[in-house]
Image (tube, coloured by chain):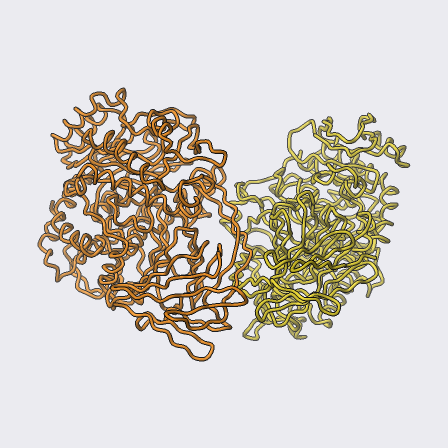
Chain colours: A yellow, B orange
Amino acid sequence: MPKLTKKINNDKLEIFLDDVLILEHSKDNPAIFVGNGREDILMYRGNFRITNLEDSKIPLKLFKETNNGIEFYYGDDSLTLIFNEEKTKCALKLNASKEYTRFWIRIKSDKDEHMYGLGEQMSHFNLRGKLFPIWSSEPGVGRNKNTYVTWMSDSTGMAGGDYWNTNYPQPSYMSSKKYSLFSDSYAYSEFDFRNENFTEIHVWEVPEQILLWKEDSFYKLMESFTEYFGRQPNIPDWMNDGIVVGIQGGWDKIKRVLNDLKSYGVSVTGVWIQDWEGIRMTSFGQRLMWNWAHDPKRYPDFKENVRKLKEEGIRFLAYSNCYLAIDGALFKEAKDLGYLAKNDKGEIYEVDFGEFYCGIPDFTREEVCKWFAKRILVEEMLDYGIEGWMADFGEYLPIDVKLSESVAMKKHNEWPVLWAKVNDMALDMAGKKGDIFIFMRASGSRAQQYAPVLWAGDQSVDFTKDDGIATVIPAALSSAVSGFCYHHSDIGGYTSLFGNVRTPELNDRWIEFAAFTSTMRSHETNRPNDNIQLYDSPTTMVLLSKMVRIFKALKEYRINFMKDAKDKGISLMRPLFFEYENDKESYSIDYEYMLGSDILVAPVWKEKTDNWKVYLPNDKWVHLWSDKEYDGGQTITIESGVGKIPVFIKKSSKYLDLFRSLKSL
Amino acid sequence: MPKLTKKINNDKLEIFLDDVLILEHSKDNPAIFVGNGREDILMYRGNFRITNLEDSKIPLKLFKETNNGIEFYYGDDSLTLIFNEEKTKCALKLNASKEYTRFWIRIKSDKDEHMYGLGEQMSHFNLRGKLFPIWSSEPGVGRNKNTYVTWMSDSTGMAGGDYWNTNYPQPSYMSSKKYSLFSDSYAYSEFDFRNENFTEIHVWEVPEQILLWKEDSFYKLMESFTEYFGRQPNIPDWMNDGIVVGIQGGWDKIKRVLNDLKSYGVSVTGVWIQDWEGIRMTSFGQRLMWNWAHDPKRYPDFKENVRKLKEEGIRFLAYSNCYLAIDGALFKEAKDLGYLAKNDKGEIYEVDFGEFYCGIPDFTREEVCKWFAKRILVEEMLDYGIEGWMADFGEYLPIDVKLSESVAMKKHNEWPVLWAKVNDMALDMAGKKGDIFIFMRASGSRAQQYAPVLWAGDQSVDFTKDDGIATVIPAALSSAVSGFCYHHSDIGGYTSLFGNVRTPELNDRWIEFAAFTSTMRSHETNRPNDNIQLYDSPTTMVLLSKMVRIFKALKEYRINFMKDAKDKGISLMRPLFFEYENDKESYSIDYEYMLGSDILVAPVWKEKTDNWKVYLPNDKWVHLWSDKEYDGGQTITIESGVGKIPVFIKKSSKYLDLFRSLKSL
């Protein structure tokens, strides 16, 4: 049970969370600021340009003790922090004297401290030194202003993004001092880790509270943290039995691909069929229909064929999102029921998705959530035998849409959470929780409690550090410290634009990496015809076959650690320092992870390399492919040609024999 | 004589400049803010990345009247505005209760108001709707994040720039309400014109004063404004007699080019020879020596040859800047005298210019200025018969250099002014003011009083709106309202990078444009061998010959208006609304100008166009090339093939006959 204590010395105030000084305040170095501002926000297809027009930032220089807290004030501005200790966390409740649209708090930091989290961060696991806006959006294509793909994306559609863009932002971080902090607000925020002595948190409202957790170990910390946010139900057992293959194009195509894969001995547990709802043609090429019911022309005898596939051990997974295309039947139903959000003229708000428009079911209304869950997800999907889907989007809530409850600026970051809730509702209604695999790229605070699991969003089909395969590693680790236990990514990546197409090598590297995550699932990319598919290449299918065997063989190992997930909110993929908290170096490792507590994985994320530098924490290690033993506490260079992803197991692991058997599978 | 008056109504304060409400303040809508902040500034070869780490922005919500002003205060923060009326201007003197590193003032604005100026702005004449940082720097290569050249420049050297980058920023603007405002500080500033009801001026110190001018006409306003900033000496008469041609490569090359030009009947008044000081080879290619003395190897018998050229009516112009290369003799002299600025270790500060380094003469010391003027500009240049030079740079003062006086952060924007002063000093010492043509790209507040004239900096050799020939027009107009009377640009542009090379059409368009400015001068670009020169093309030389004849024929016309410049600070190139203040449309015209008060010029700045849209203010107009008459108050489309720059004269002009004679020259 963590405790908050205050220490006052003349005009200086210190607040401690157990032994950690978290707030240091004096007249000359105030820690609390209030103010006002306006914003100018431009959205173009899920990409936002956010401009802060700041009116004031008033340091509340003075303070006085109150009953159970501290009042900070200056002039006629004031804000009270009320201390509230609960069983496994502390709360600083915030009580402002009037309404402010801007709030800042400076949390004390030390030079050597590391911070992690903020939801799913693709470019940085260790957050120190940078400022991170918290705003759900498209993740960006390229995500580095120096690359050609980013520049083209920016200049053609405002879509290039930057290091901080993410589908899943969350205003919480974990400190290497073994505390976690959550700024309880869905408003636009910024976490500024650029200063040596403090972390500045900036929120476009006064949050209700700042929550703090403090424990003696990172594992305990995750347990307390996820007690608040909720813990995910386990992913279905059948997801451990093979890969889910992304295919499109109708039953014949699916059968052909499955036969090919079978002939190479690839265990397939499911097919993921985006175009189950039919397609539409636009000048950009083929798009999906966005009316969440199967297309009987493209997929005739739908229910029967889904059932037949299942008989062969292969589940049918579909695609859905939280919009309804205006030319679809479900849009009409929702419209007639009055369930769609309006614009300020009282008309139905129509969002541009590129030559077609969609309505927004207003998820701030419980009856709308229930309708979407039952009428669509249950009746059009689960009832047909569909056993999973990509629950896409959630990031596009325009800020000028009129909602039943609250304003869009304060709901924007919550929208993915509501969308996750709607998906979870459907499973509850159908009594199928734990049997269905739903995957989302968007997310937010408190979505942890719902069934949908994260996938890492839309990597470019390349080896770039800020948008390629590499990004999946910080993404998995930052999601882990943010409370998500299951993380995976599109095998082969997704975004193929401006001549950027994937190589067989990229597919191969992604396959070997996915085998050591929670889930293997492939994607055909946004341009399936321009990109090589894993089912196109015999050498890739040979590798895939082997890697799926390894993945299946690790089922027992993973399931053991899934208990940690369910009971304690501890993720399958973990930062090294969770396990090696006394190993100082491990706090700076952004591109390696532990799978469970025994296996260390260092995916190769650069192309054309046969050697890879791996940091091994202080322990005894056995290398997967050579069986060689290594002492930790050092960086080694290991042979790592395609198919030889650097993987090590603790020599002391009880799974050592299983591990040693993998290479000959 | 403008007057400041205050009107107080309960908690609301209004300050009027004559009849213009310039400040509106109440508790809920304060106009004055103080605060503190830190900055993180990265400089790479004259390009800066400036990050504001803001600690506070305290609205001084309350106010009380004092003796001769108003005290604004909140908590223990306060700042007094003291009213000070002088003959042709008013001052708001600022008196803060303690030191602040940040200051903001909101000047009242109306929806329909236009603002112009801020020194030399290349992308916008009318400033409404945007935020403009005031920080002297490289102008940027590309200056528009959507262009390939900008992206390449950014990703290879932080050099792409943006719409606001300029060599000559000045914290002053002119309002369409016929007042001008100057924030008297050389610190980093921002002018934010994005708000409808106010202009927010943000300065990284409390400026000494805000100066205000108000007159009944724009001409009178310029006169009062430049009374304070100083007015430039006229440019030498001989600059009216032909073109100054940029050439490099030694005496033989110069003679060959001059002969070619002569054979086409081109009047040449001077040659501008950058490599007079010798060259050095780097991996980037040929660079100059940066030791400001002639190179006797490359230019043997220097004085004699300069004299001979002059006998043929051709002046020798050279190149210099405010740095001294560490491998040159003049560096050694300066070093031995202790005239070079130091770093924080007490060593001579060496600035990286790309494989060679330079020292910085400390112009905050009067004796250093005098030494540079006398020892270099007089003894190494004027005494040899040099009659002009490019006084390059001034924008690169690093912020961590140790100066004799003040700190570099507060001197950065002043450096070009000191550099202009040094050049002016040299002319005074030699008694040659009015005879010598010095041109600078950098500038700043109060440099107006010195001899060097502006050139528009380093346009890319193309037709892009943000970095090509187009930029010269807003650059000339914004400089004009900022107090500079003579503006010109490199004929043909300068920057040729990433495969961007100039076309003959660009040379031709620039020639016809330059003929209707104050000066004709050409540049060979940064890559002379890759780019076509005006002396390379017979058709261009035919055009040039004609355009120089027109330029010469307009000498009398220009000289008439140069009196306005000398006596009243009214520029040769002027905004349309100076002359047509009742023509509402003319306030929005960014790409046309008046040459003097009778000639309207609308340069063609797009490629491959034979027609051009021209707005004619409410008057009667005669078209130069067709002699056709047009009524103003409308936009017309005019035939405008190469060589037919759209030019019109007022039908009522006393120069109509001269004008009509031009087309047959």
Asked if B391 appears above or below A98 in the picture, the reply is: above
Q: Quadrant of the image for the N terminus of chain A?
A: bottom right
Asked if B615 appears above or below A338 in the picture, the reply is: above
Q: Quadrant of residue A611?
A: top right
Q: Quadrant of the image for the C terminus of chain A?
A: top right
Name the residue furthest bottom: B10
Q: Position of residue A129 (x, y in %)?
A: 61, 45
Confirm whether residue A253 shows in the render: no
Q: Position of residue A351 (x, y in %)?
A: 58, 63
Please count the marks in the image.
0
Give A83 or A527, whichever is nearer the viewer: A83
Asked if B136 appears above or below B108 in the picture, the reply is: above
Name the residue furthest left: B657
Q: Position of residue A18 (x, y in %)?
A: 78, 54
Q: Which residue is found at the position 20% from the left and 21% from the top?
A: B301
Give B76 or A342, whichever is nearer the viewer: B76
Confirm whether residue A115 shows in the render: yes
Q: Position of residue A63 (x, y in %)?
A: 65, 65
Give A396 or A565, whichever is nearer the viewer: A565
* Left or right, residue B299 beside residue A530: left
Name the residue furthest front: A10
Q: Quadrant of residue A464?
A: top right
Give B164 or A535, whichever is nearer the viewer: B164
